[in-house]
Image (cartoon, helix red, strand yellow):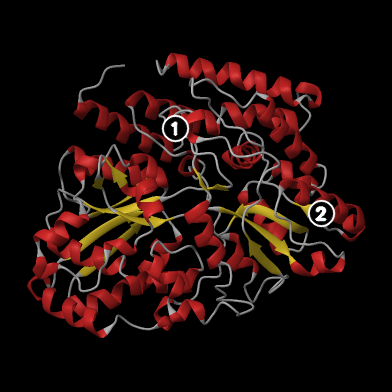
Amino acid sequence: MSFKNHDRQKFIIDTANAFTNRKISKRDFLRNMGMAGIGMSAFATGLLGGTRPFKGNMAHAASHGGTPEDVANFLREAGKPFAGTTIRYTSEATPPTVVLNQLKSEFTELTGINVEIEIVPLEQVLAKATQDVQGELGTYDIYYLDQAWTATFSRDTIDPRELYESKPDLAMPGFDFDDFSETLVEGISLYDNKWIGLPFDIPIFTLMYRKDILEKHGIAVPKTYDEFTSAVELITAAEKENGIFGTGLQAKSGHYSLECDWSQAVWGHGGSIFGADKKFSGNDSAGVEGLEWYMRMLKNAPANSVASTWDGQWQMGASGQVAMIQSWAEFFPGWNADDSEVKGLWEMTKPLEGPATLRSRDMAGFGEIPNWGHQGGSSIALSRYSKNQDAAWLFLQWACSKDIMTRCTLAGGFAPMRNSSYVDPRIVERKTRVGSGTTRHLDTVKWTIDNAIASEPDVAIWAGVANNEIPTELGKLVTGQDYNGNAQACMDKIAELVDQKVEEADLL
């Protein structure tokens, strides 16, 4: 299909609205997005029609202090010309957005600028942003952008570094661009040497474990897949009659959560999803070894693992059903909340390292980065078409300032985007806390971001196959519907399906 730009944008909007109204399926939505050339990260696509893995214990953000006096004075003065202005931001319900919505009145009190944060399903975030740029409407002043949309919206946003330099009267003191994690800027917010916005959100895999169960059985905290396997099988054998399993998985057939587990298992065993020749490589020896290991883990996990997405996996950890899980670090705050059945018993450590060395990036295809810590992420960006650009720029700086990013983390427990947040005294003070508000997991999160961040392929067809062909065929294997337990046969079939998609998209 050939599109003029206006027709393409209208097609995206109509498709997103049709999906929201359940007039088309997720498969049709993704196919249409692919036809229109719009990227969707597989992580984001997994949220379509569903919820985020975050299950934290949301605290009241205002209780963690107020805007520092130098910044407050700057905002009072800089905001005077814009008092009474209203700026609008649309986003899905990410943890930092939810907390920011709590705090926005503080910005309004300082500047007189009103802020409307519209929280809608992800496909509507895309539809609203696309409609805005299509007509250059300026209805929304700030966009939430999934990492796969970075290139698509690069021309429609303003590089915050350039704005900071060009408008010194509106430059927040101590904003410090160098304080943002370089890894996150490169992976989420940078396109053609332009910052399309500021890094805003980063879900990532780490290893979490029940210290009481490991201590009970004299098990050292696992560092490798082999050590993890031995520990999981020992715990299951000893504790199954007590309703406790070695691990729990997010292995629902046809769901992106299963693909997340699978891709991490493949990377962890020295494999990759694609090879340098752009052919699917999950069916090579390393890929098959990873899948066979995953099936072995399923035998040591609650039976409902094959019906669980991240929600079910989180429940396994919160209810005390499992001893160890390698999954989203965002689980940790909720497992340590005051109303958790296992409050204070969970700890976090670095993600597992494999029995083999990681496959190098130049041996993988489509920008894939094999590593130990599976990730997803997003940016927050200033619209080029905003009619209230200066007022919105003040809000964007405030929202992504050192203080606010730290307070968002304290209120929700998720990973901050700024390096300084990890050493902020308010974060450090809670590193020994047990229960709600703990930050004792954040050093591990930062290490994983800096040293072990893994990324799925960056290609338009990926969101579709990661949410359809791959988890559907994997589901047939893990539920016993097909393949008779043969991991190689399953991977060969997936290779056939995925390579066909690559060929049809003329990507070879």
Q: Is residue 364 visible in the rendered structure shown here? A: no
Whether residue 367 sits left or right of residue 403 in the image: it is: right
Q: How far is disc 1 from disc 2 in space, using C-alphas? A: 47 Å
Residue under the image location 20 percent in, 56 percent down: 161
For the image shown, how many numbered marks are present on the structure? Answer: 2
Q: Residues within 10 Å of mark 1 (few under 14, many from 20)?
A: few
Q: Secondary structure at mark 2?
A: helix
Q: Quarter of the image containing the N terminus?
A: top left
Question: Is 477 placed above or below 380 here?
Answer: above
Q: Which residue is mark 2?
A: 231
Question: Which one is in front, 445 or 360?
Answer: 360
Q: Amino acid at mark 1?
A: Lys
Query: Percent from the top left, x then y, of residue 416?
Result: 43, 64
Query: Percent from the top left, x then y, of residue 233?
Result: 85, 49
Query: Percent from the top left, x then y, of residue 356?
Result: 67, 38
Q: Outermost residue, left direction?
A: 81
Query: Percent from the top left, x then y, of residue 463?
Result: 47, 33
Q: Which residue is mark 1?
A: 23
Residue under the image location 16 percent in, 50 percent down: 138
Question: Is 189 placed above or below 134 here?
Answer: below
